[in-house]
Image: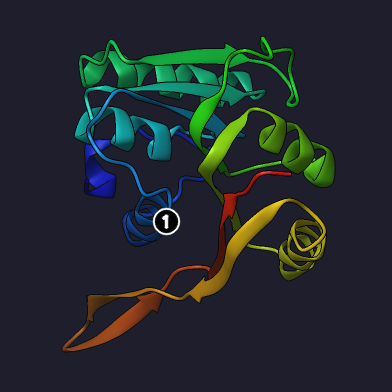
Amino acid sequence: MKDEVFIRGKVPMTKAEVRAVSIDLLELDNSSKKLLDVGAGTGSIGLQVACNYPKIHVTAIERNPDAVALIKQNKIKFGLQNIDIIQAYAPVEIASTNKFDAIFIGGSGGNLTEIIDWSLQHLKTNGRLVLNFILVENALTAMQHLEKCAVSEITMKQIQVASWHKLGVGHYFEPQNPTIVIGCKKIEE
């Protein structure tokens, strides 16, 4: 989905190219599955999954009231029935029987390792966990922690995107912030 289709505010949004890589690493298909979007921000990951995979149920957790309002506006705009929004600080209480097929972590609010552990508790065996970072230190913390967890197939990629723009009589590539994307699969403990 193009960035322009989303109702946007002042909350940062995961850009289209990074969404594409992150959603690909979640290894979703259109069977009945559940995705958890933690630190959803504007909800662009969860919203795009809900649009592209109508049989997948998305639960978005976000603490920022402005971001929650944007997710709700976009849910209405796209006519989505398969996304729920929880306004809370993660980790939040979720029934232990409620296991997700895939979990995306877009923000951690300083509780990164706690959120990773909590996410893995709520992720089905062989489920995919994907995390996005703009700060190298947070990505390294996540990577070091995941290496001690019951996961396999750990990957870390940095994505740098620049878009072509006209400037006067010439053109240039306007860069976006580099984003680090980590993906892994939960294994049996």
Give the image's coloring scheme.
Answer: rainbow
Foreground of the two, 91 or 13 = 91
Asked if 33 appears above or below 109 in the picture, the reply is above
Residue under label 1:
25
Which residue is the extreme one toward the front? 188
Asked if 166 appears above or below 183 in the picture, the reply is below
Residue 181 sits in quarter:
bottom right
Residue 63 pos. (x, y %) = 67, 23
Asked if 120 appears above or below 173 in the picture, the reply is above
Asked if 138 appears above or below 12 in the picture, the reply is below
Q: Is residue 7 visible?
A: no
Residue 55 pos. (x, y %) = 24, 22
Is 60 left, or right, of 20 in this rendering?
right
Residue that appears at 45% across and 76% down: 160
Foreground of the two, 179 or 50 = 50
Residue that appears at 59% across and 33% down: 123
Residue that appears at 60% across and 65% down: 154
Q: Quadrant of the C terminus?
A: top right
Foreground of the two, 142 or 7 = 142
Residue 21 sits in quarter:
bottom left
What's under tag 1, amino acid-wise?
Answer: Leu
Residue 69 pos. (x, y %) = 48, 17
Q: Is residue 30 visible?
A: yes
Residue 6 sits in quarter:
top left
SS assignment at label 1: helix
Is 174 left, or right, of 69 in this rendering?
left
Classify mark 1: residues with Cα within 10 Å, few (<14), some (14-19) or many (20+).
many
